[in-house]
Amino acid sequence: MSIDKETAAKVAKLARIRVEDDALPALAEEFNNILGFIEQLGEVDVEGVEPMTSVTPMRLKRREDQVTEGGMPEKVLSNAPDAREGFFAVPKVVE
């Protein structure tokens, strides 16, 4: 897959990044380099390799799964910049 200047401009718009027209060819080339690297990763044989959670061997702490009601909505919402009627309030985003 190859990214052209128009596609790079569309990706920049979707990501809400302002990119000047003269910088679009460099951005498209950078996208192509990233895609090339991803294709290289797809060629790596990982058969029999366990997934890692860290570069150093460690075990994650485990706990028993339990369904609860939470019981602390006030504490959870105390960090919200805007909370209304027991919910997080976010601005409406429509294009």
Image (cartoon, rainbow, N blue to C red):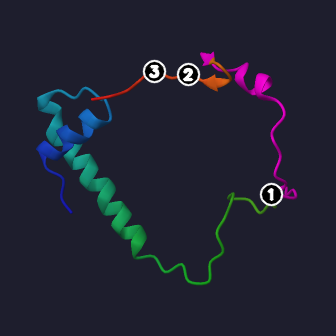
Residue range corresponding to the magenta coloring: 60-83
Residue occupying image coordinates x 20% and y 43%: 8
Checking the image for residue 60, the label placed there is 1
Residues at marks 1 and 2, CA–CA distance in whole angstroms: 33 Å
Q: Earlier in the sequence, mark 1 or mark 3?
A: 1
Residue most extreme to the front: 85
- Assign the magenta stretch its main secondary structure: loop
Q: Amino acid at mark 2?
A: Ala
The quadrant of the image that shows the C terminus is: top left
Residue lying farthest to the right in this orientation:
64
For badge 3, the amino acid type reads Pro
- Give the residue at x 28% y 36%: 14
For mark 2, what is the residue?
89
> 55 and 91: which one is in front?
91
* Residue type for callout 1: Leu
**Could you tell me if the residues under marks 2 and 3 are in contact, i.e. CB atoms within 8 Å?**
no
Vertical comparison of 24 with 48: above or below: above
| Above-or-below relation of 29 to 71 | below
Residue 43 lies in the magenta-colored region: no
| 66 and 26: which is toward the camera | 66
Secondary structure type for disc 2: loop
**In this rendering, the label closer to the viewer, 1 or 2:** 2
Q: Say how many tags the image has.
A: 3
First in residue order: circle 1 vs circle 2: 1
Picture coordinates of residue 53, whole percent (x, y): 68, 59
Q: Is residue 73 magenta?
A: yes
Q: Nearer the viewer, mark 1 or mark 3?
A: 3
Q: Which residue is mark 3?
A: 91
| Inter-mark Cα distance, 2 to 3 | 7 Å
Q: Which mark is residue 28?
A: none
